[in-house]
Amino acid sequence: MSPAPQSAKSRHVAVVGAGAAGLVAARELRREGHSVVVFERGNEVGGTWVYTPRVEPDPLGLDPNRPIIQTSLYSSLRTNLPREVMGYRDFPFVTRPGQNRDPRRFPGHREVLLYLKDFAREFGIEELVRFETEVVKVGILESGKWEVRSKKTTSFDNENNHDSEFVKSSEVECDDEIYDAVVVCNGHYSEPRIAEIPGNVFLLVISFEGVDLWPGKQIHSHSYRIPEPFTDQVVIVIGSSASAVDICRDIAGVAKEVHVTSRSVADETYTKQPGYDNLWFHSMIESAHEDGTVVFRNGKVVPADIIMHCTGYKYHYPFLDTKGFVTVDDNRLGPLYKHIFPPALAPWLSFIGIPWKIVPFPLFELQSKWVAGILSGRITLPSQEEMMDDVMAFYSTLEASGIAKRYTHRMGDSQYEYNNWLATQCGCEEYEEWRKPMHHATSQNKRIHRPETYRDEWEDHDLVLKAHEDFVKYISKQKS
């Protein structure tokens, strides 16, 4: 769509969250001339990349009223994407000088946080952020504007509660403010999905008989930090995502046995992981029993101490009141035009960072450019009816392809077409040619060639050289 032939307008915009999505959204909004306030519950930028060693007292995250006081990082986490692909397009994630910086191509989580802080400093974003300020309500007014209610919180260690390692929060004040638009960037890695426990009232995703009677301990990967508590234990890990792959190997170094199960594998699956004497892959769990045993669909019976749910997260917006225009149904947030705008509320409400199975930071950047340009009137949106027709056509395509509703926002390879579409809308260059093959090379290396060492051994050196040639151009433009 071509830019609208009208003068740009400045809007007063609230951004919820100062993680990777919120930071780049704030930058693009300000670049477009908008007045921006960023609300951040924590005391620093970085969102999910802020490591919190303390965890909530509810290891499964079942209590809907629990205070979310932690991110979902574990201590050993390294990126599963190379830094060249991972960074924002015009602020390359290159190795930077400084004490205790991580120069590896697949760095640890602390280096990603430092990169985000570098980004915030470079573009003066921190001055826009209200730290330790939690958004408790976002609601639309009859005027079409948005009321944002926030409370100031101060976090402190609860010295008398070391066993649960809980961090309390004391409410200080509550404010109501009016904004032209709200951009939601609070992420979707804090509300766990777990295997179903019969009789539980919460929305869950995987069920197996008897788990309510099983006497062992259950934990979601949201609350996993270090392997030592699993020493000499028999652990069952449910899941096949990146966190399950990392955590099962992390735990295997200290545990007696680790058994990984997933609904995505055949019922007869039973294999031992090469290089490990205590790590097995199974088909899904059939049942659990009062004597502590767990039975898999392959017929194997394992006496287990702990079940670790690496089963993902739910989209969760307890603060958002859209009068029913936006809902979450089986982890489909919608209706959303291009995963960003609810047609009935566009462009005044938008979401950045909803898609998953993606390279996140560059996608957030292009989404943010599009939102910022639309809010200023420089870029036009289709009519509400046209947007809704597009959403329904997309849903029909998913259904015809047999794709379950919960995978609505999973992109995979389609992210490149999506990103280039956004780039065209924004009037900026499409993705560099090296990005897609570099991402594919990493995926192949991880899945097939070197699953244990792909972060430290690779063969796409030619693509790395091309990436750094482009990075020199970006850095030169910034300096000029």
Image: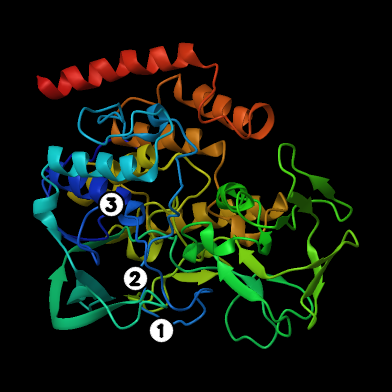
Q: What residue would you read off at disc 1? A: 65
Q: For the residues marked 2 and 3, what is the alpha-carbon distance in whole angstroms?
A: 14 Å
* Above or below, 409 relative to 424: below
**What distance separates the C-alpha of mark 2 from that of mark 1?**
12 Å
The residue labelled by disc 2 is 69
Find residue 187 and report its image quarter. Answer: bottom left
Q: Quadrant of the C terminus?
A: top left
Q: Is residue 177 above or below residue 227?
A: below
Residue 362 picture location, percent across and down: 36, 37
Give 332 or 211, whichever is nearer the viewer: 211
In percent of the image, x 29 and y 26: which residue is there? 95
- Name the image colouring: rainbow
Q: Which residue is mark 3?
A: 46
Tell me whether the residue at label 2 lies in contact with that at label 3, contact meaning CB atoms closer than 8 angstroms: no
Residue type at mark 1 is: Asn
Q: Amino acid at mark 2?
A: Ile
